[in-house]
Amino acid sequence: MKLKIGIMLACLLAGASAFAQSMEEDILDLVNKHRKKRGLEKLEMVDAITAEADKHSRNMATGHTAFGHGGFDDRLSRLMRKLPGSNGGAENVAYGARTAEQVVDMWLNSPGHRKNIEGNYNLTGIGAIKGKDGTSYYTQIFIRRRN
């Protein structure tokens, strides 16, 4: 019985991981296509930023933190220490969207989120997490690092 539960849990986690990776890649692709149309620099996905974004999305999905930008200053401070030469950052969050297109459209239709997407950033990380109730939560963090 324990083996069966372990296999089921592994399959569930693999499915969640596949969802996250696919959504994160699709969101990045759509954001970079938008930036290219505007003549802006392409964003590079960075594991350390993705880990922070993922953690925030997970915390929102599990109710450990309210939906929103609470704790962003702490996330940004940790990233500034991990990414020498970084000098600025921003964050977009969303929930409920079922596709990457819906997430990016929501952000582009919000002046503040659009400003972040079109901002003077060159690094990013994206966290996409599906909660137990099936609702998906998204965080994209933007960082500017001097080249």
Image: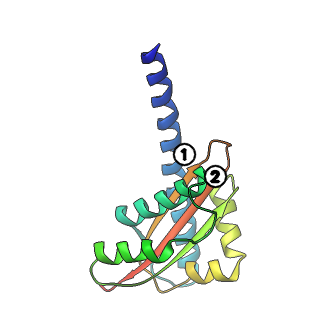
Residue drawn where x is 30% and y is 76% of the image: 81
Residue drawn where x is 66% and y is 72% of the image: 107
- The colour scheme used here is rainbow
What's the amino acid at mark 1? Phe
Nearer to me, 81 or 85? 81
Q: How many numbered marks does the figure carry? A: 2
Residue 73: numbered disc? none
Say if mark 2 contacts mark 1, CB within 8 Å.
yes
Q: Which residue is mark 2?
A: 136
* Mark 1, other Cα within 10 Å: few <14 / some 14–19 / many ≥20: some
Examine the rendering and report whether any part of residue 123 can be seen: no
* Residue depth check, mark 2 versus mark 1: number of the one nearer the observer: 2
| Of pointers 2 and 1, the one earlier in the residue sequence | 1
**Which quarter of the rendering shows the C terminus?**
bottom left
Q: Which residue is mark 1?
A: 19
Quadrant housing residue 125 = bottom left
What's the amino acid at mark 2? Ser
Quadrant housing residue 31 = bottom right
| Mark 2 element type | strand
Examine the rendering and report whether any part of residue 80 can be seen: yes
Vertical comparison of 10 with 31: above or below: above
| Mark 1 element type | helix
Quadrant housing residue 69 = bottom right
Vertical comparison of 39 with 97: above or below: below
Q: Residues under labels 2 and 1: Cα distance?
A: 10 Å
Q: Position of residue 120 (x, y in %)?
A: 47, 86
